[in-house]
Amino acid sequence: GLPAVPNPFPLDVRKLLIADNHIRAIPADFFIFYGDLVYLDFSRNAIGRLEEGTFSSSAKLVFLDLSHNNLSRLAAGVFKSAARLIKLSLAHNRLAEVDPAAFESLEQLQVLELNDNGLQTLAVAALDALPNLRSLRLEGNPWLCDCDFASLFSWLQENQAKLQKGLNEIQCSVPMEDRKIFLSELSEGSFRDCKFSLSLTDLIIIIFSGVAVSIAAIVSSFILALIVNCFQRCAPSKDDDEDEDGDD
């Protein structure tokens, strides 16, 4: 298979199939030369990351298949200029992290495939950025049914019609237990304890807030003590006033 994107192609090419090769990266200037592309298939390659700005000139792109690659992370705004995308396949990669702003500007996207990756959690904000989403695949990920998953579960329940495989095909691991459970067996009540628990971020904020308040109190007390001490030193004493009256 090809180790890199071959060239040249006709500059006005609209459909390009480069699947089943050993391509490790999409050139950062790829769409500068092939900005008329509408359909692009990079599936079954070895792409490990998407460089910032790779899709900066992909305004006409409608179909993008990046499935069966080695992607592990999606950064914020990575597809920002591909605003006309209707289908995006990222299935069968190694995705473990999707930035909440990864899909920003993809308001036309209707089909998103994130199945068979390494995702344990996914920010609801990433999905809320897709107002026209009709089909979503999330099965085949090692989802973790903890409190961080609660908001995503609520979203999935409300949007079951968009799940191509339904809740019956999505499993998650139960914390502290060596077992998996289908999301169809869960309910909002399964996460009721999360309403009274604090996340790690919340705990850090509380701790740092407490430390900051304590430091502020100490500094304020120290300054107040200095002011009082200075006032006591500078103000004339009662004995001095009496001596002055006696001299008169």
Image (tube, rainbow, N blue to C red):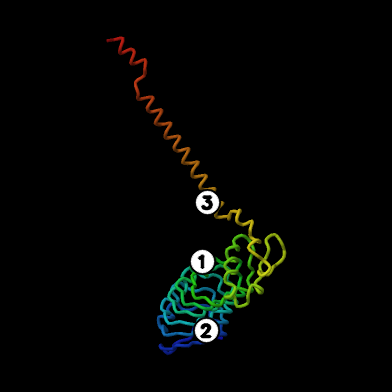
Mark 1 vs mark 3: in front: 1
How far, Cα to Cα, is label 1 from label 3?
Answer: 21 Å
Label 2 vs label 3, nearer the camera: 3
Q: Which residue is identified by label 3? A: 205
Which of 3 and 145 lies nearest the eye of the viewer? Answer: 145
Residue 245 located left or right of residue 87: left
How far from the left and from the top, in percent, is residue 27? 46, 78
| Residue of label 1 | 125
Residue 181 versus residue 36: which sits nearer the camera?
181
Placement of the C terminus among the 4 image quadrants: top left
x, y (%) of residue 160? 59, 73
Name the mark on residue 41. 2
Q: Secondary structure at mark 1?
A: helix
Picture quadrant where residue 183 is located: bottom right
Q: Quick one: SS at disc 2?
A: strand
Q: Is residue 121 visible?
A: no
The residue located at (46%, 85%) in the rendering is 38
Q: First in sequence: mark 2 or mark 1?
A: 2
Q: Name the residue type under label 2.
A: Asp
Camera-side mark, 2 or 1: 1
Name the element at disc 3. helix
**Quadrant where the image shows the N terminus:** bottom right
Q: Amino acid type of disc 3? A: Ile
